Image (cartoon, helix red, strand yellow):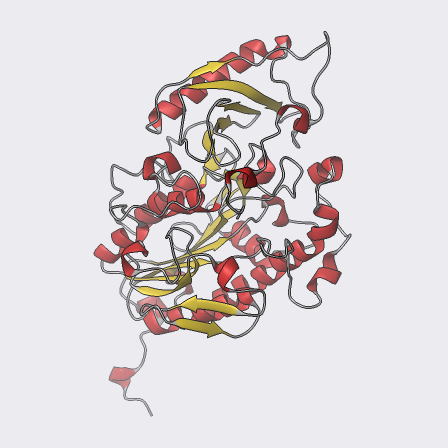
Amino acid sequence: MTPPAQQPVPQSRRPPRRPNVIVVLTDQQRWDTTGNPLDLTPNFDRMARLGTHALAAFTPQPVCAPARAALQTGRYPTATGVYRNDIPLPPDARTLAHHFGEAGYATGYIGKWHLADKDPVPPEQRGGYDFWLGANLLEFTSDAYRTIVYDEAGDAVALPGYRSDALTDAAIRFVTDHHDRPFYLFLSFLEPHHQNEVDDYPAPEGYEERYQGRWLPPDLAALGGTAQRHLGGYLGQVKRLDEGLGRLLDALRSLEIAQDTIVAYTADHGCHFKTRNDEYKRSCHDASLRVPLALRGPGFDGGGAITRPVSTLDLPPTLLEAAGIPVPDAVQGRSLRSSSLPDEVFFQVSESEVGRGIRTDRWKYYAVAEEADPWHTASADRYREQALYDLASDPHELVNLAGMPSHREIADGLAARLARRMSEAGERTPVIDPADPPPGRHRVATDPLVRISPPPVTRYGHQPR
């Protein structure tokens, strides 16, 4: 029998300590795959119901690397310098790993990084994480049933199983090995991103058939694109991700640390299935920008729903504050628990075009620097209004009101708000020219591709990711 002095202390009698923190990040996951009629995400949905759920969460940039830089630093892509893919996170950038590590946390990163310039990622490009089991471009080092990541020594590690399962298993091992002290883990999946070289969404065996043809979001039903061919595999990937989330939460419960652990779940951006431009993201629409976001654990259980629009830029200060770690002045996001969140979210678009926009409860307003080279230009001094959507009557953004005389006063007010948000983000205060009125007295551009048609990303000589 174990001597009484060595018996574990019951959870209710454990001395308080700083909470553990786990961030679960998916890649290219639409917000409407959660709370979905197909019951794709019961674990996320329960987490959202019992914890804190941001009903309208948006990425600050619908492109992989810029969105990830923002999540690591709490700073806008133009502030970090990572305004597009293929720009490494600067060595002096302060990340969540630095802040948690300096507070005594064990820090770990597992999965896709996309903030370096090579694989394996050299130590100086790992953002301050101690434990490392990742790949910069996981979509090129692995496929659905062949997961190759690299450890701290830069050695290749093959993880068995379906890719999202393999990374979940690695996360459970990390938690098991580090739960004797506060830990911070960033778990970054590739799913439900497409597999680049085959332009497909490889779900686990049997999962694509389960969901093919069963549900189609209204925007995709109206606009076409590649959803009819790809949605079954995409939704199958989402289902398996949620099953992995459930296994991770079960592990925390088994280790008796669930009540001591904050778990945040979100995505880097959404997916519009080639309806708005020639690939899957990089547009101003909610299908690109809107993502799932929920948190559970100390400080978040029973928090209810946040109904106003929020940015995933707000996640880093939220987590630091919840852990009792001072939020640096350089962080541009605000805690989700703050009473002073702005009334709109600000977002930037790169690579397809140099675009800037805001999204309120009711309105989406967007402007583009028409003469700027989006691959080499981070921001510009002059933009032209390109999109205005009334989300109350047009939630799927099918009717572009930009340039309509009936909405000129509303557009002018939103333009002023956008210019202010750009200045607050560290950009130059721009000139925003109004859109030209549409031809005909009563015509409205109902096809967004007529008026919002970015050039294909491949024209600049890089592969879309």
| Residue 271, image x, y percentages | 60, 44
Which residue occupies 49% across, 73% down?
159
Provide residue 158's location: percent of width, then percent of height: 47, 73
Q: Measured along the vertical axis of the image, is residue 51 above or below residue 174?
A: above
Q: Nearest the camera: 245 or 125?
A: 125
User: Which residue is painted at 54% across and 23% down in the image?
Assistant: 365
Q: Residue at x 71, y 26 (%)?
A: 447
Is residue 208 visible from the viewing direction of this image? Answer: yes
Taking the image as shown, residue 245 lies to the left or right of residue 89, namely right
In x, y percent, where is residue 209? 75, 62
Left or right: residue 118 versus residue 3 is right
Q: Could you say which is closer to the camera, residue 125 or residue 406?
A: 125
Q: Is residue 232 above or below residue 269?
A: below
Res 236 → quadrant: bottom right
Quadrant location, the N terminus: bottom left
Residue 150 on image: x %, y %: 39, 67
Q: Residue furthest right?
A: 213
Residue 303 sits above or below residue 441 on the image: below
The extreme bottom residue here reads 1
Report how many numbered discs are placed on residues in the image. Answer: 0
